[in-house]
Amino acid sequence: MVFTLFKLPILCLECCLKNMDALDLLFLSFTSRKLLNLIRRTRTSVIRFGVECDSAGYRTVVTIVRRGGVENGKWTFNLPFSVPGIKKWIKGWEFMFWRNPNNSIQSYTTVSHIHEELNLGLAYLMYLFKCKTLRVSITGLTTIDNGKLKFLIENFRIAERFEISAPMHSTFQCDPEIFQSKELVMGGEWITRDILFGLKCSCIFLKNCHILQMKDFEAFIRRWYNSTDTEFRQLAMVVDLPRNRFNLKRQKLMKWDPEMRSRYYPFNETEALDCENGKDCVRNDGLLATVLKKQKMFIFVVWHERHPDVTGLQIV
């Protein structure tokens, strides 16, 4: 018995589409322009795409995430051609798709560069689900090539979060304003004071800082204190420096006052930072900030909410 989807009333059809997996919707969109447009009009609850790139350049995976942070399918790019699959033309390039039983798909195309293939696939997903929120991570043990890294940064500058956990060359150079993500996590081997000051991200986490010194961290705080910046949220630097005291006399650092702010700061989606031993300063516009050191990490956070809810977060 053949079931004709379009014979359903429009409200029933939209209800069916809302309850389908993201990959089912993706494959349905390949069948006709009419279905593609109908899926675009349906509120599918897709809230972001997670992009994980291998530093060696062999594999890239896009994870589709729905409301509540639930993963709802993976698309793996640049696997070797093996058996015939479902064909789809995207922007003039032929893609071959295979569906796996673990709610994931694989694709192969004649595009010469994996990142060009990724751009085409992501553009299609963003168009289909009307969602442009990206979280990008570059992983692996191989030191990533400078040119490849710059290409990825330029192409994913709109990402909500950009994380580089793979090793980087200390010779890497780029305009810091190219980083436009809200959150930036990366190695600080190549970061100088000028580059740090040029970053426009609201949350910055720099690991293995070899060039930056305590005076650069203090200068960053002074610059924020004397500015009108209301977007910045936090800076964390991992650097091996012996000094524990901060030279911030003009900022009039104060001990923690429970009436002024909470003890715990929501550092990320899973952790809250214990700021009991942090020193506070208040800017002219009333924004309060805290500086503290935890082992080899120097941290500066701004309290946009003085008493945030940290229920469910792990205290660190």
Image (cartoon, rainbow, N blue to C red):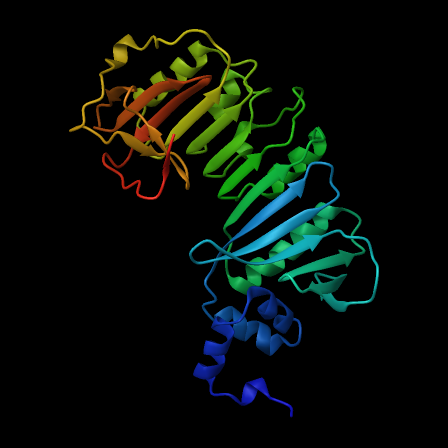
Give x and y (percent) for residue 188: 56, 22
The structure residue drawn at horizontal position 64% and vertical position 61%, both measured from the top left corner, is 102
Residue at the farthest left position: 259
Q: Quadrant of residue 170?
A: top right
Q: Quadrant of residue 34?
A: bottom right
Q: Please name whichever residue, 298 or 171, is drawn nearer the observer in this view of the structure.
A: 298
Residue at the farthest bottom position: 1
Q: Quadrant of residue 127?
A: bottom right
The structure residue drawn at horizontal position 62% and vertical position 60%, both measured from the top left corner, is 124
- Check the image and report above or below for 268 versus 283: below
Q: Is residue 243 visible?
A: yes
Q: Please name whichever residue, 231 or 167, is drawn nearer the observer in this view of the structure.
A: 167
Give x and y (percent) for residue 268: 41, 37
Q: Is residue 199 visible?
A: no
**Which corner quadrant holds the C terminus?**
top left
Give x and y (percent) for residue 106: 71, 58
Count the marks: 0
Q: Is residue 177 left or right of 276 when viewed as pictured? A: right
- Check the image and report above or below for 8 versus 231: below
The structure residue drawn at horizontal position 65% and vertical position 56%, both measured from the top left corner, is 75
- Check the image and report above or below for 192 versus 74: above
Q: Please name whichever residue, 88 or 254, is drawn nearer the observer in this view of the structure.
A: 254
**Which corner quadrant holds the N terminus?**
bottom right
Q: Is residue 199 left or right of 33 when viewed as pictured? A: left
Q: Is residue 82 left or right of 208 when viewed as pictured? A: right
The structure residue drawn at horizontal position 70% and vertical position 28%, both measured from the top left corner, is 143
Give x and y (percent) for residue 198: 48, 25
